[in-house]
Image (cartoon, helix red, strand yellow):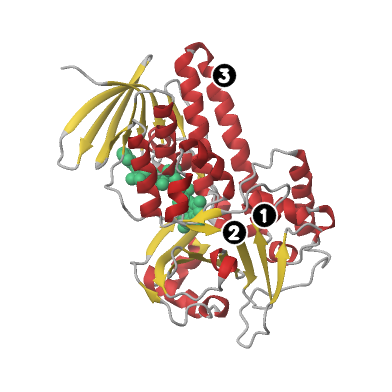
Amino acid sequence: MKIDMYDVAIIGGGPAGSTAATLLAQAGRRVIVFEREKFPRFHIGESLLPFSTQTFDRLGVREKLNRTFLPKYGGQIVAACGTKEAKFYFKDGFRSRLDRAYQVTRSEFDKLLLDHSRENGAQVREQTEVKRLVFTPDRVKIDIENSSGANETLEAGYLLDCSGRQTVLGNFYDLKKTYNHLQKFSVFAHYENVDRPEGIDGTLIRMVRGLDRWFWIIPLTSTRASVGVVMDTKTFRAMKLSPEAVLEKCISEQPTVMERMTRAERVSPVYSAGDFSYRNTKFFGDRWLLAGDAAGFIDPVFSSGVFLAIMSAEKAADTLDAVLRDESRRRRLFKKYARTVNYIMDIYLAFVNSWYRRAKEFVEVFLNPNDTMQIAAAVNAVLAGSGGKSFQIKWRMWLFYFFVNAQRFVPLSPRLSLVPKKEESPASAETIGAAS
Ligand SMILES: Cc1cc2nc3c(=O)[nH]c(=O)nc-3n(C[C@H](O)[C@H](O)[C@H](O)COP(=O)(O)OP(=O)(O)OC[C@H]3O[C@@H](n4cnc5c(N)ncnc54)[C@H](O)[C@@H]3O)c2cc1C
């Protein structure tokens, strides 16, 4: 029997898989994607970052995205005590050239990107699960099974694992290292009629920071929003309640979330996800690379997941294309790929660590922007997905962390309680990242 041979086979048709598939197909490579689900399907990860825009341009999907999804001009962080909040607009980021990202319903976004990779010449097989992989010195053999139980074997020169948190190869080779200090649990759902301001402010992600939990409200369409809460896994377990009851209880106890939800009606099941923070110790082998969540996922805060998925998939596609041109460069290019992706993940890890380890101090400093040195603008740029490679951004981020740490001992910014107040005074608003 003749076995089909591809240049690259991709596991997973999420944002990472479809991005890599389109770019490889555009480069003239024979590429196939295996996706075990039938799209559209629900997925979490709805608030995007502006720095994905350059990849969307390369893919040729920006017009389609503009037509389909709500723009996102920035975000807002609110202290749960209700006394202070701050908005940041991407246009005010350090040397910003991008003023917006998108808020997306992932079922539609993922389908749009996967259909686009088909239109660009990638083969896509939905409802097809990768069951077994065998690596030989010059290829990978892939056993797949479709929804009716039929099995098939295909071969490819290289395998790109974009299987998300399933991380097929990470589990296969036992590469997964969880972040023990980030054992979080999240419950979330879609709601109709969540109140939001008119105009640009109605497009912002709203994050409410409590002492031991934080909430997101993400506008998805003109009437629909995603609402979720993240807490320690042990806090969730201690509640001894179902995910539905936890979401309801957390929202009802939080006036700065509740004030937006007096007319809200839940229109989706309550979903949950837990223990989602990990990184694989290796991102490549002789015949494979990992990209997106299959390489690692840090934390939902700061909405970096899809940005990291798309960024790493773009770099993986370019790396594989170069290696297919000249196999002798493989080792060097794979190493460079892993170094670059790890470096960018580390930037978000440092940010996330500060958010959780110094919860109160982080919010106190963030909500009191003193922009004489454009520190807030640099923080804003990282929140937009600027890799932070520039020294100009790096030293400003160091100073930000320094102020957050110093805030423990010296109240450089006014103290906040982060505990909801029943009769809160109206929040005083600030704008982060505006040029000083
Ligand atoms: C609670 C929470 C909130 C989040 N919020 C945000 C946010 O606001 N913004 C943001 O940017 N990110 C967010 N994220 C992260 C985001 O969900 C992910 O980073 C993003 O979806 C990663 O994309 P991906 O393509 O790598 O993986 P995925 O989108 O997970 O795609 C992987 C695909 O692989 C398929 N697959 C898996 N195994 C197999 C197999 N064996 N065979 C065939 N197919 C397979 C799956 O069906 C899936 O479709 C959040 C994550 C969590 C947990």
Secondary structure type for disc 1: helix
Q: Residue 294 versus residue 68: which sits nearer the camera? A: 68
Say which amino acid is labelled 2.
Tyr
* Nearer-N-terminus badge (2/3): 2
Q: Quadrant of the C terminus?
A: bottom right
Whichever of callouts 1 and 2 sits on the residue coming sooner in the sequence is: 2
Q: Disc 3 versus disc 1: distance between alpha carbons?
A: 37 Å
Confirm or deny contact between disc 2 and disc 3 (CB under 8 A): no
Q: Is residue 13 among what the camera can see?
A: no
- Residue at 25% in and 29% down: 143
List x then y, in percent, for residue 55: 52, 39
Locate residue 228 relative to residue 38 in the image: left or right: right
Q: Which residue is located at x 18 percent, y 32 percent?
A: 151
Residue, disc 2: 73
Q: Residues within 10 Å of mark 2 (few under 14, many from 20)?
A: many
Tell me: 158 left or right of 153: right
The residue at the point 47 percent across, 60 percent down is: 185
Query: How many numbered tags mark residues here?
Result: 3
Q: Secondary structure at mark 2?
A: loop
Tell me residue 75's x, y (percent).
Answer: 60, 62
Front one among 413 and 200? 200
Crowd around label 3: few <14 · some 14–19 · many ≥20 (10 Å): few
**Residue 21 in picture, x, y percent from top left:** 39, 33
Tag 1 near tag 2, CB within 8 Å = yes
**In the image, which is nearer the foreground, mark 2 or mark 3?**
2
Tell me the quarter of the picture where residue 193 sits: bottom left
Q: CA distance from mark 2 to mark 3?
A: 39 Å
User: Dot 1 corresponds to which residue?
Assistant: 91
Residue at 60%, 32% in the rendered image: 340
Q: Secondary structure at mark 3?
A: helix
Within 10 Å of disc 1 (Cα), the crowding (few <14, some 14-19, many 20+) is: many
| Residue type, mark 3 in image | Arg
